[in-house]
Amino acid sequence: MNVVLELNGERVEIDVPPRTTLADCIRHGLGRTGTHVGCEHGVCGACTVIVDGAAVRSCLMLAVQADGARVTTIEGLTPPAGLSPLQASFRRHHALQCGFCTPGFLTTAHALLTQEPRATRERIREVLSGNLCRCTGYIDIVEAVYDARDAYLSKSPGGKS
Amino acid sequence: MLRLHFAGLPNHDTQQPPHVKLPAFEYAAPRSARDVVELLAAHRGAARIIAGGQSLLPMMAFRLVQPELLVDLRNVPDLQQIAVDASGIALGARTRWCDIEANAALRIAHPLLTEAVRHIAHYQIRNRGTVGGSLAHADPASELPCIVVTCEAAIRVLGSAGERVIAADDFLLGPLTTALTEDEIILEVRLPAWPRTRRWGFRELSSRAGDFALAGLAVFYDADDAGIARNAHVGMFGGAGRAVRLPNAEQALNGTEVDGAAVRRVAAEAAAEAEVAGDIHASADYRRSLVATLCERALSDAAARANA
């Protein structure tokens, strides 16, 4: 079936069988391999992408369901040169090691801080509970997200008031 | 603009189990509930509705279901409304958990519902999963089936024979089994009005945040002028095949002043009457003990809200 979507700001059109998950469509069909696929049944969070502003598991969404949607992957969160403030914070806090889960954490945290730039540590932990990391443990990741809040506060209208 | 063709991954159907990729199916995204019903009827039980897909897609990945056709509700209008009026609350079938979480009016109009929704799965899943999907799926460990049973909600459905309204208690038949016929679609769930002074509590326990609950309790009652509990409702989920009310516990709660001794007495009744099953996650004895503990905590929360 034909699917037209906006991927990281670029309009793309792709023909996929209906059973293709959005994750496989992004990786194999559209060649953006930054989105990682772990469990493929909605447990690990590695495949998280942002669809119309909401973080979703791309293994639990069909590509055909994303027709007409705005999809943002880790490639879309990364500036042409250097790192985004959130990515820089992950690096500063040693919030990644092997890197497999990292795109899922970054997309989830980006969606959260965009909507809730004042998220507390408790809220960050609650939201990140849907993502698994087997390397660093979670403390550094929570701290990295918490520490990146300023960059989102200054972006949101009336954020710093 | 990129133009690509993706034929799918090789060898899906020749792979030996464990399968992970989805089995093949046809897909339709009709523009009205009536069209959904027609497609369901034409496929005689071999079609499935997909809304958020947060339970259906994993089940398909594991080959627990292999529908011929998925009928997507994404283009069906008027299924996403949240309406609050004097008679109660109506939630369209395609209302997502995140829509409920974001709705400030609901926090006052039905605090038990919003608290229960906070416990559902994970952030990303709450951004896709829907009210109607949860009810149609009828997982024994899901929160919403317990809320609709405890609150005596009504579920409005549409089928080839027209619309009908099903009481929540008649809707849930058992694990993953509902009163829906193969050509019916859920339109909305309607929860009765919630008095502002109502006392309530919701507790569940799961091994890790976002996991399925080992057991959970939803309780509410109205207190009269003397502080005596009336209209007690106690619902349990996760213990056995479906969410149920616990009538002995309700009876023990009605007519009492809700102090520590009463809370323990009601909790003991709940544990005694609860039908619980053991599985790989917890033994039946553990679950029975958990029902008592959760009931005690939920009731204590309810009593504490009286003074808040």
Image (cartoon, coloured by chain):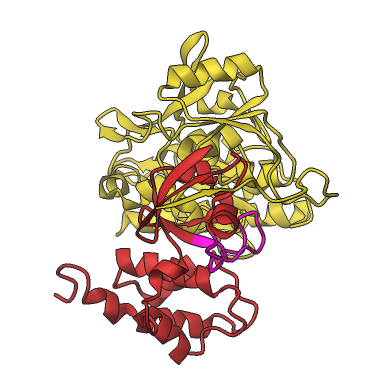
Chain colours: A red, B yellow
User: Which residue is at a point 65% across and 54% down the rendered structure image?
Assistant: A41
Residue drawn 70% across the image and 53% down it: B287
Left or right, residue A110 beside residue B130: left
Residue most extreme to the top: B161
Q: Is residue A143 left or right of residue B78?
A: right
Residue A123 appearing in the image: no
As drawn, A89 above or below B243: below
Q: Position of residue A44 (x, y in %)?
A: 61, 64
Residue A74 x %, y %: 46, 69
User: In the rendered view, does B257 fall on the left or right side of A32?
Assistant: left
Q: Position of residue B107 (x, y in %)?
A: 31, 49
Considering every residue shown, the one lying at the far right of the view is: B16
Report the front residue among A145 and A122.
A145
Decide if residue B11 is on the left or right side of residue B229. right
Q: Nearer the viewer, residue B20 or B140?
A: B20
> Where on the picture, by quarter, is residue A46?
bottom right
Query: Which is nearer the eye, B218 or B214?
Result: B214
Q: Position of residue B256 (x, y in %)?
A: 45, 44
Q: How many marks?
A: 0
Res. B280 image quadrant: bottom right
Q: Does the rendering let one see residue B9?
A: yes
The quarter of the image holding the N terminus of chain A is: top right
Which residue occupies the foreground of this view, A22 or A13? A13
Residue A47 in magenta stretch? yes
Residue at 41% across / 22% down in the picture? Answer: B32
Write down the region rendered in magenta.
Answer: A31-48
Magenta span dominant secondary structure = loop
| Quadrant containing the C terminus of chain A in the rendered view | bottom left
Q: Height in image: A1 above or below B171?
A: below
Residue B201 within the magenta-colored segment of the rendering: no
